[in-house]
Image (cartoon, rainbow, N blue to C red):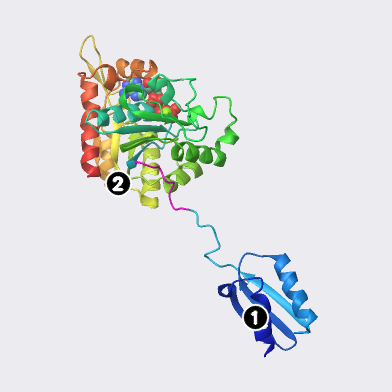
Amino acid sequence: MSAEEIAKKIILRHFQSEKIDSVKVLGERLVIKLKAPEDNTKADAIKAELSAINAAQKINIVFVEDKKDKPTEPEHWIIKGVKHIIAVASGKGGVGKSTTAVNLALALANQNLKVALFDADIYGPSIPLMLGYENIPPSSVDGEIFEPFAECGIKSMSIGSLISEDTPLIWRGPKACGAIQQLLTQTDWGDIDVMVIDMPPGTGDIQITLSQKIKFSGAVIVSTPQDVALIDAVKGINLFKTIGVPVLGIIENMSYYICEKCGHRADIFGHAGAKKTAEKYRVDFLGEIPLHYDIRSNADAGTPIVQSAPESPYTKAYEQIAAKITEKLK
Ligand SMILES: Nc1ncnc2c1ncn2[C@@H]1O[C@H](COP(=O)(O)OP(=O)(O)OP(=O)(O)O)[C@@H](O)[C@H]1O
Ligand SMILES: [Mg+2]
């Protein structure tokens, strides 16, 4: 029996045959390659047994990585029961992303869809305020799976439930992604046709990670009409395009203001900038939402306008945008 064959017999006492990559005698040296994670205890045992029978002067055992041994990280987080997920994003903060996300989710629910809203804005989670469950922690029957909130006929959950306002900004980094993953994947959503995610503003690492890990059907970009917001909106469009998430279109929020007393229309932040940007970057323009007192006051009171004033022209504006989105998801 050759030294290689003897060595193989000994190795088989410690590893299955498919783990043996090669056994070679190179001069005085016996070189063993194993397709397994490094295991010094077993390597020492094999060496001791080979030395005891003088199989070779020197023995090298090398562990090479077997792809099968490597725990494969799933490409996307698995969010059970949810058919479509859309991101509501903005390059810039404060442009009305959350107000749009919540009213859009309610407008989608008005189309008889089962809708969920997830607040992933680690920098300023505001969905609990807008849906009226601020400072109420989510419940869990078994301590592992959360029950989503069910205000205004949609299921929802907010990262604000896990991080308080005084959580240091530094914690809101990669750790926050873990918290978002936990809340998204460990919530009993039930059957959901469309989940709307209120994304954190900006286009940094957190936004990139979330856009890669969440299997989005598409992204909606919210911008106000002025250039400073649109420059950042373009960054958002590019981020999603780079990652391969289809951009469903741009919404121009705070598009214009109509004075309730005299009917005068004022384009406070300019007007139609988002439409021009959409044309330039070849994405669809989904519609415009005016700046109106009722939109703000209802959002702040936990009674979003789509729910509290179903016949208002503002609700109709959100519903028209929602109809365009569902058409695109088909
Ligand atoms: N169309 C609108 N008309 C009137 N007020 C609005 C409108 N859209 C948003 N607002 C108000 O503007 C403020 C900012 O909106 P919102 O919180 O939705 O923005 P955001 O982009 O989510 O901000 P942040 O980046 O801080 O999360 C809120 O007080 C909201 O009520
Ligand atoms: Mg917000």
Please give the name of the residue rendered at 36% of the width and 19% of the height, measured from the top-left corner: 299
Classify the position of ligand 1 by quadrant: top left, top right, bottom left or bottom right. Answer: top left
Residue 94 visible to an observer of this rendering: no
Q: How many numbered circles does the render carry?
A: 2
| Amino acid found under the numbered disc labelled 1 | Lys
Residue 145 included in the magenta stretch of the image: no
Q: CB of residue at label 2: within 8 Å of ligand 1? A: no
Please give the name of the residue rendered at 58% of the width and 67% of the height, measured from the top-left corner: 65
Residue at image mark 2: 281
316 relative position to 296: left or right: left
Quarter of the figure that contains the C terminus: top left
| Amino acid found under the numbered disc labelled 2 | Tyr
Please give the name of the residue rendered at 21% of the width and 35% of the height, measured from the top-left corner: 323
Q: CA distance from mark 1 to mark 2?
A: 62 Å
Residue 92 visible to an observer of this rendering: yes
Label 1 environment density (alpha carbons within 10 Å; few <14, some 14–19, many ≥20): some
**Residues in magenta?**
74-81
The local secondary structure at tag 2 comes to: loop
Residue sticking out furthest to the front: 13
Residue sticking out furthest to the bottom: 1
Q: Is residue 274 above or below residue 55?
A: above
**Where's residue 162, x and y in %?**
52, 30
